[in-house]
Amino acid sequence: MSIVVRIDKCTACETCLNSCPFDAIVLKDGKAAINEYCNYCKTCISACPEGAIYETEERTQGAEHRQRIEDFKDVLVFAEQREGKVAPVSFELLGAGRRLADGLGVKLLALLPGADESEARELIRWGADRVYLCSGPRFNNFNDDLYAGALTKIINEQKPSIVLAGATPVGRSFVPRVAARLRTGLTADCTSLEIDKGSGNLIQIRPAFGGNIMAAIVCPDYRPQMATVRPRVMKRGEYAENRAGEIIDFQCDEITSGTKVLETVKEVSGISVNLHEAEFIVAGGRGAGGEKGVKLIEELAEALGGVVGASRAAVDEGWISYSHQVGQTGKTVNPKIYIACGISGAVQHLVGMQSSDIIIAINKNPDAPIFNVATYGIVGDLFEIVPMLTRKIKEIKGL
């Protein structure tokens, strides 16, 4: 369905502008106009005193639309780059995309703006069948208009059934614009992706209601099916040095922008906690009890050569800074070993660490939910167990 303004009846009284909760109505040439942010809530229809706004059916409905859906195939990954190098999240998306493409029997495509052919070749080695390369200085720095234009163009030309992007600041900024332009659905912050064997639709799984449930979302009537995926929740695919693939120079000269990026300034912080790249993480929760417990956790992390993580409860108590927080409202991690000390295992925390290779849980409560995802579980007091682990690791390392 579509919301339409009858220009001959509109008096530009601005009642509809004030009623719209999505700022989807603007005045254009002295008349109300509906823009791409419309969510079809229909509030404006009842608010208009002149009856100038009404609902109508679009031509895209019915058999004609269903036929177009059948024309969509392939899986497309937006490959993000930083300073000319492909970002790690792009390789994770290729792993997920390769699995989905193989399940559907289609090709895996990638769009790479702002990098060179060597980086495009790396995408092929990680699983892409075809890479569309948008080179040139315009794409070196992120620009909403240019990136949205390039992704919209490739979707319109290649008609992929599934489009994946990272739920990074870049992806979260411009991918919703693309979905709005294409009038299709977008599921943000996905933690799992599956194919419905019956319908072939993409099942997009993400936390909902503050992480209290995991929602399975489908977009059966529109294409492409678009999703942004949390970094560090998907596994990279198989790397093949001699994998064959095609690199296409994708021209986007006609795409313009009303803004120009003059300079990119990196944030400078006195605290550097690289949880994303850590191979060993020792995390503390409410069971740490305070700074004394956190100190023991820090000593174990130091002995392992890892970093310290924390649940939201420990951060809220002020025992450790937010930069260490793991979970839905913190960082998503995927280390080789994750040691959870005094963490109960609320779903909000599990979302951020359950894809770790090995999970070791230490908790006094044998019924704590953390044990449901743990590879190894230790029922006991962390104030006794953690120092024992630290001493043994130091002994083995000869520290």
Image (cartoon, rainbow, N blue to C red):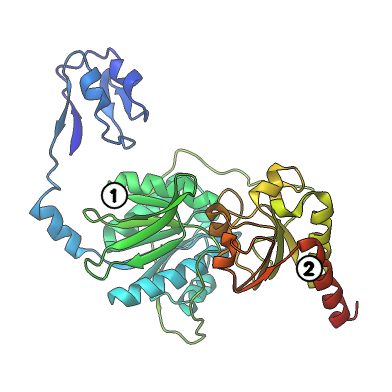
- The one nearer the camera, 100 or 29, is 100
Disc number placed over residue 385 in the picture, else none = 2
Is residue 342 at least partly visible in the picture?
yes
List the residue tagged with mark 1.
184
| Kind of residue at disc 1 | Thr
Task: Name which residue lies at 43% across and 69% down.
Answer: 96
Q: Quadrant of residue 294?
A: bottom right
The answer to whether residue 86 shows anywhere in this view is: no
The answer to which of marks 2 and 1 sits earlier in the sequence is 1
Cα separation, mark 2 vs mark 1, equals: 52 Å
Give the percent coordinates (x, y) of residue 159. 27, 61
Instruction: Please name which of the two marks, 2 or 1, marks the residue nearer to the observer.
Output: 2
In the rendered image of this protein, does residue 80 appear above or below residue 102?
A: above
Q: x, y percentage for residue 260? A: 52, 42
Which labelled disc corresponds to residue 389? Answer: none
- Quadrant of the image for the N terminus? top left
Q: Is residue 7 above or below residue 124?
A: above
Instruction: Count up the numbered dots.
Output: 2
